[in-house]
Amino acid sequence: MTTTTERLTDLGYATGWNVVRRLPRPVTDAAFGLAADLAARRQGPGTRQLRSNLARVVPQAGPAELDDLVRRGLRSYGRYWQEAFRLPTMDLDEVHRRVDATVSGVENLDAAFEAGNGAILAMTHSGNWDVAGTWLGKHSGTFTTVAERLKPDSLYDRFVVYRETLGFEILPADGGAATFRTLLRRLRENRAVVLLCDRDLSNKGIPVDFFGDRIRIPAGAAKLAATTGAPLLPFTSWFIDDGWGLRVHPRIRVNGPEEVASGTQALADVFAGEIATHPADWHMLQKVWISDLEPASPASTGGAG
């Protein structure tokens, strides 16, 4: 049964896609910037969690620097949503040309397709991953990705339609073996699979070291590489003033099931380096570190033994 909150959430996104694209860009720039600054001042749960996450990424930052970083992070997140609401009506050929002028490491992607096993591109929730997808689709053809099944179903369907309009093939994250088999098939067809890998929704991911503590990263990307021989390529995204930065990193080799854990750690290391370089563009307003997710012990909370 759909709750009132879920219906309002769906309505909010529907309004975004219908209204934002119709307004002049300076108007929406100002509106999203103001909303981000208000969120920074109000210190709601998402903002507090973003601050906690960024404090791990930039541990040397003092309170004032961290305040500024959180504000810039929320503005970056707002920019992502503003662009998402506009993207279906933008000139995607022009978007591709602009990204093509700044992207680096394309030779790593081209080499993957020349080898004939497809490519597994692993991303974080940084910059604008939808713009990264539009560039990839223009460069290498239709690719396949996996999406969290949002509630209500109408909201999930809305996001599927949005990304299919951009040329993505969307599979449900809760599709289990059927989703995995489809991903295997796409790689055997020498196509690309794109996976967001910095947040583990299943609580079954592989623990890795990440900014001095442990998080879990979904094992799917490394498992696909181990099963198919397809190259595992970190694919990172960030914002620049007049566009988007993208990098296709060199291949992480995962030569068999016994290397899935080490390959996942290598992926986490690349992610950490890129997030540290562009911390404001990492849009992680949720808990990801295991120590944040696990309940505190009685001893750590001062409870009686």
Image: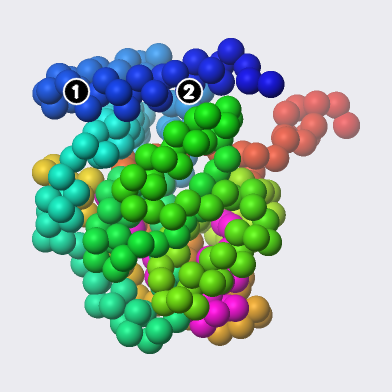
- The x and y percentages for residue 299 are 78, 34
Please tell me how crowded label 1 is: few (under 14), some (14-19), or many (20+) other residues with Cα within 10 Å: few
Q: Is residue 291 left or right of residue 167?
A: right
Label number found at residue 10: 2
- The x and y percentages for residue 166 are 31, 48
Looking at the image, which residue is at 55% across and 43% down? Answer: 148
Say if the magenta span includes residue 236. Answer: yes
Looking at the image, which residue is at 42% across and 52% down? Answer: 124
Quickly name the residue at label 1: 22
* Coloring basis for residues: rainbow
Which residues make up the magenta segment? Answer: 217-238
Label number found at residue 93: none
Q: Amino acid at mark 1?
A: Arg
Looking at the image, which residue is at 52% across and 36% down? Answer: 156
Q: Amino acid at mark 2?
A: Asp
Residue 287 appears in which quarter of the rendering? top right
